[in-house]
């Protein structure tokens, strides 16, 4: 019997697998190899909320953990996946300039926001009428490369490609069984598709569709991520990730003309250089009603667990969330109450 069956291999499933590998626990992953939100995400690690100049929840803990973690993964897989790169937020008026300077003098933002504004004429081709604010502790992770290199180099014999059929899952008192695999526990890391999981579909996952573009722009600099009305992030070879839309109504992963037009319109508001659109894709973020992650054990079955609900911050948060969940499952440490799915237990019992 193995220790854990992991279902799903986006950034959450990957990070949980890595916890188990480090602690020498046996595991198998079942997941499709591509097409997750993680594969399409910009992979930006940003400890701040750039709309309102706030820190994210537990920013210090998440950022310190994430930067070290992806660096060590890069060493493990011997493949470049983390790029330390500043984010430049376009400031649109003097009020925003003042708010930036005030925010950058407060704890904990003083560590993340440079209080000296970056002059607008430093970057050709970008409209920044009131200069830029610079995020200092930020990075980009190439999720796609990371996920495929990890499967290929680290867990080639522990990865089963495909989707789990819930009807075939047997839950026993001492573990679970799935098509001949016996495991002490199962950890579901299914992102938004968890709404189809009969064990965890009582949780309030809202889902927020995001469409994005890949463009080529030969004359744009590749050493910063720009944040204007949307993100414009270099991904190499003069290609840039552009996005994204937020749509809570449409729960499909189809691309739309409306989404594309919206993205082009926002991009043209701050990029003044010729570009070519190479790709257009969409996925759904696993957003939660109270904007906190979903970690913990099923209210009825003690060997069923979930790691989900990372919204727009999966790359930043999933290394530490995976660690918390591992410690909870294997060493009976407590989860932070804000992230523990116990907060929604009433939904489960109400629906019985
Ligand atoms: C356009 C866009 C841009 C984004 N940009 C960023 C960003 O810059 N930075 C950031 O931190 N976050 C970003 N995000 C959010 C980020 O993508 C998510 O927080 C993160 O990817 C969630 O990871 P996950 O592993 O929980 O889910 P997912 O990446 O969705 O992975 C879930 C996995 O589970 C699999 N699965 C589902 N059901 C089953 C089943 N029954 N059996 C087997 N496997 C199953 C899926 O196929 C998939 O492999 C962005 C999201 C979008 C849509």
Image: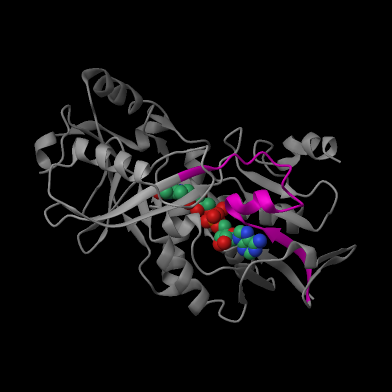
Give the magenta part as a residue range.
181-209
Q: Does the magenta stretch include residue 186?
A: yes
Q: Is residue 322 left or right of residue 258?
A: right
Tell whether position 324 is magenta: no
**Image quadrant where one finds the N terminus:** bottom right
Q: Which residue lies most toward the top here?
A: 95
**Of residues 327 and 291, the one drawn nearer to the viewer in this rendering:** 291
Residue in the image at 65% along x and 40% along y:
339
Near-viewer residue (253 or 191): 253
Q: In this view, does 299 lie to the left or right of 140?
A: right
Quadrant containing the C terminus is top right
Q: Where is residue 182 in the image (x, y as percent from the top left)?
A: 79, 74
| Residue 121 visible in the displayed image | yes
Whole-percent x, y for residue 121 in the image = 9, 37
Query: As rendered, which of 243 and 21 lies closer to the eye?
Result: 243
Decide if residue 244 is on the left or right side of residue 38. left
**What x and y, as percent, mark residue 319?**
54, 54
Outermost residue to the front: 257
Tell me the residue at 13%/35% (across/down). 120
Horizontal placement of 201 versus 88: left or right?
Answer: right
Image coordinates for residue 313, horizontal then vertical, percent? 48, 45
Q: Which residue lies furthest to the bottom in this view?
A: 157
- The vertical placement of 236 against 61, above or below, is below
């Amino acid at each position: 019997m193995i220790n854990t069956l992991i279902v799903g291999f986006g950034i959450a499933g990957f990070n949980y697998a890595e916890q188990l590998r480090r602690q020498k626990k046996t595991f198998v992953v079942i997941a499709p190899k591509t097409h997750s939100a993680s594969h399409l995400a910009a992979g930006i690690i940003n400890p701040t909320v750039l709309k309102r100049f706030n820190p994210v929840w537990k920013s210090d803990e998440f950022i310190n953990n994430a930067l070290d973690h992806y660096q060590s993964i890069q060493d493990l897989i011997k493949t470049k996946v983390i790029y330390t790169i500043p984010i430049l937020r376009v400031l649109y008026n003097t009020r925003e300039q003042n708010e930036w300077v005030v925010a950058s003098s407060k704890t904990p933002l003083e560590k993340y926001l440079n209080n000296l504004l970056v002059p607008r004429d430093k970057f050709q081709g970008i409209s920044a009428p009131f200069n830029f604010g610079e995020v200092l502790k930020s990075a980009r992770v190439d999720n796609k490369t990371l996920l495929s290199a990890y499967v290929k180099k680290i867990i080639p014999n522990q990865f089963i490609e495909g989707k789990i059929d819930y009807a075939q899952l047997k839950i026993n008192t001492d573990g679970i069984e799935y098509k001949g695999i016996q495991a002490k526990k199962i950890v579901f890391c299914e992102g938004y598709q968890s709404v189809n999981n009969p064990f965890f579909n009582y949780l309030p996952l809202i889902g927020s569709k995001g469409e994005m573009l890949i463009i080529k722009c030969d004359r744009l600099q590749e050493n910063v991520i720009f944040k204007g009305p949307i993100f414009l992030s270099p991904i190499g070879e003069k290609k840039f990730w552009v996005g994204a839309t937020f749509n809570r109504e449409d729960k499909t992963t189809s691309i739309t003309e409306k989404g594309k037009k919206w993205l082009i319109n926002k991009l043209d508001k701050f990029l003044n250089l010729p570009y070519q659109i190479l790709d257009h894709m969409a996925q759904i973020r696993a957003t939660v009603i109270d904007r906190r992650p979903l970690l913990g054990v099923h209210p009825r079955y003690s060997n069923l667990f979930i790691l989900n609900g990372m919204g727009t911050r999966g790359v930043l948060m999933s290394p530490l969330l995976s660690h918390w969940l591992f410690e909870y499952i294997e060493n009976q440490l407590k989860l932070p109450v804000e992230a523990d799915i116990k907060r929604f237990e009433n939904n489960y019992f109400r629906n019985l």
